[in-house]
Image (tube, rainbow, N blue to C red):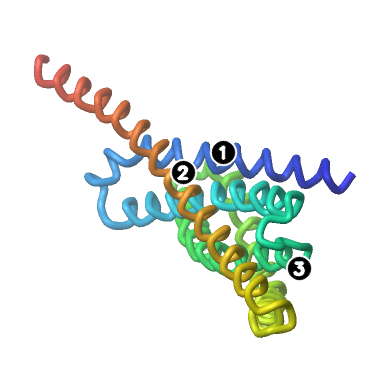
Amino acid sequence: MTFLLIAFVWILNLGISAWNAYAVGKMWVYAKQMGWWTRLITWCGFVMSGCGFSWCFLLPLALLSYVNGWFGFDEKALVASMNLGYIVLAPAICLSGLFIWIDSLIMAWKERTFTSMAVAGWNTYAQLHNTYEVFTHMGPAFENVGSFFSHVGGGDDDSESGNGKVIFVIVLVAVSIIAGFLVTTAIVVKTARAESKVFQAEIASKMEK
């Protein structure tokens, strides 16, 4: 049951991240013409997508490392890698979500449609939930990672294997984050190029008229 729940959340997060990247790509061309606030929200969407994809890479890579025992990757290393990823990604998600939430409130106030209000309501819930999670889990995450680095890398394990395990955890998290943002960039660039062609075609059509 736990595995199915994790798989469902993983697939959901993958879909949301892909949609965010697509939406950012659609807005990329127009954001340059619409002022600093729109550009800020677009970049926030980019960060949210990149963080989402990063988590989608980190979880299977950490599990794969644990199953294969690469560099002595054990249960403690698995937990530490997920916590380290959380420490890096959660503040970025929370801060980006804050601006996106504010923008959704502004849009709901201006448009006053069911869709805009529903989006604002969901963003309100998501932001409150993410903020609560950061305040409640960030401390224990730091404690776990600090304990792992000090005990494993500090000599409780064999010195060479312990240091290798710590380095592997850091590299695993770094690779996951880089891969996540590379995927986001690829989707944004591809979508933006397609949207740019549509935008240019519309301009050409208006000029002909």
Residue 161: x and y, percent?
66, 71
Rendered residue at 17%/25% (across/down): 203
Give the Cα separation between the discs numbered 3 and 1: 44 Å
Residue 36 lies in what quarter of the image? bottom left
Amino acid type of disc 1? Thr
Comes first in the chain, label 2 or label 3? 3
Rendered residue at 46%/53% (across/down): 178
Q: Taking 69 as reference, is 22 left or right? A: left
Residue 192: x and y, percent?
32, 34
Would you call the spot at circle 2 few (<14 residues within 10 Å), some (14-19), or many (20 or more)?
A: few
Q: Which mark is residue 111?
A: 2
> Helix or strand or loop: what does disc 3 sit on?
helix
Image quadrant where one finds the N terminus: top right
Q: Single out the mark in the foreground, 3 or 1.
A: 3
Q: Is residue 193 visible?
A: yes
Would you call the spot at circle 1 few (<14 residues within 10 Å), some (14-19), or many (20 or more)?
A: few
Rendered residue at 52%/37% (across/down): 19
**Location of mark 3 (residue):** 76
> Helix or strand or loop: what does disc 1 sit on?
helix
The residue closer to the viewer here, 150 or 108, is 150
Q: Taking 50 as reference, is 13 left or right? A: right
| Residues tagged 2 and 1 counted as in contact (Cβ below 8 A) | yes
Give the Cα separation between the discs numbered 2 and 3: 50 Å
| Residues tagged 3 and 1 counted as in contact (Cβ below 8 A) | no
Amino acid type of disc 3? Lys
Would you call the spot at circle 3 few (<14 residues within 10 Å), some (14-19), or many (20 or more)?
A: some
Residue 91 lies in what quarter of the image? bottom right
Q: Is residue 203 above or below residue 68?
A: above
**Location of mark 1 (residue):** 115
